[in-house]
Amino acid sequence: MPLRRDPTLRQRRLGAEMRKMREQAGLGGSQLARALGLNPTQVTQMETGKIGVSAERLRTVAAACDCKNAPLVDALADMATERGKGWWEEYRGKLATDFLEVAEVEGHASGLYTCTTTYIPGLLQTSAYASAVFSRATPLPTQQDIGLRTEFRMKRHQILHTQGVPYQAFIHEAALRMQFGGPRILAEQLGALIEASEAPSITIRVMSFDTDTFPGSSENLTFAEGVTPELDTVQMDVAHAVQFFDSPAHLSSYRSVFARLDAAALPEDKSREFIRSIMKEIEGRYA
């Protein structure tokens, strides 16, 4: 079987979960290789996503590691049999891998939570707002790049509007007031937020400047729920990159962050009123 040159995030995650399974069993790579009748290099290649793993092999690994977590094993076996390519793959080679991996995480999520402090969450952005955000990037992208990135971001919206994945966004007041593209584009974006908040699968909560604390990172965060809690993923946007976290310690920490956000943010109805008040204030600047 030829080695994969660039395993996808999903393929790497499957391998990482197999490694966790082995480590929790207290087995070294050589020990697992002997139990499976493989050489240690093959175990390393499986755990880094360089080679594929069948559902049968996955279950054999789980048995060798004495893993009793049946829901997790079943979910990993399903991952091992995935063959279809996501819509984002048509952009491979056209956009940076970070863009594709964000869409890949969203595409396999059973629920999504976001927390943003500097801009409206990507899944809720209008085309004009998204284009304005991308036009502020450093180094400055070409108009063609801005158009491609905006098109990709708009396609990501299908996870909410077509597939109806439950989505909860915690948006800081600073993000509601940041004028990417000017007041008209912001007012249009705020109107779109209000409309989106009426959808049954979308919840929008605001963290106002009056909140006495801000529980969580100053970076923009996404928590993607997997089929089982062990397969949850945290995505953090940092300067010029996207980082993903899936260790039990990180997942526990960020579950706590979102629980605290839930306790501190304005209720849905008050959040909607708050966004509407800012929209009217912005509209007054160009009336």
Image (spheres, rainbow, N blue to C red):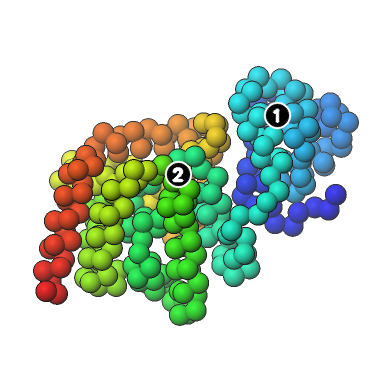
Residue pictured at 29% horizontal, 69% vertical: 180
Residue 41, given in percent of the width and then of the height, sits at: 82, 42
Discs 2/1, front: 2
* Residue under numbered circle 1: 22
Q: Residue 247 sits in which quadrant?
A: top right
Residue 277, given in percent of the width and then of the height, sits at: 13, 56
Residue 101, given in percent of the width and then of the height, sits at: 56, 54
* Residue under numbered circle 2: 165
Left or right side of 188 for 256: right
Residue pictured at 66% horizontal, 28% vertical: 73
Residue pictured at 16% horizontal, 49% vertical: 273
Report the amino acid beneath label 2: Val
Q: Is residue 133 visible?
A: no
Disc 1 on helix, strand or loop?
Answer: helix
Report the amino acid beneath label 1: Arg
Q: Is residue 38 above or below residue 51?
A: above
Left or right side of 19 for 32: right
Q: Are marks 2 and 1 in contact (CB under 8 Å)?
A: no
Name the residue at the bottom extreme.
Answer: 143
Q: Is residue 85 visible?
A: yes
Left or right side of 8 for 177: left
Disc 2 on helix, strand or loop?
Answer: loop
Instruction: Please tell me the numbered disc located at residue 40.
Output: none
Residue 276, given in percent of the width and then of the height, sits at: 17, 55
Nearer the N terminus, badge 2 or badge 1? 1
Neighbour tally class for label 2: few under 14, some 14-19, many 20 plus, Cα within 10 Å: some
Residue closer to the observer: 162 or 4 = 162
Residue pictured at 40% horizontal, 58% vertical: 122
Q: Is residue 221 above or below residue 95?
A: above
Residue closer to the observer: 261 or 27 = 261
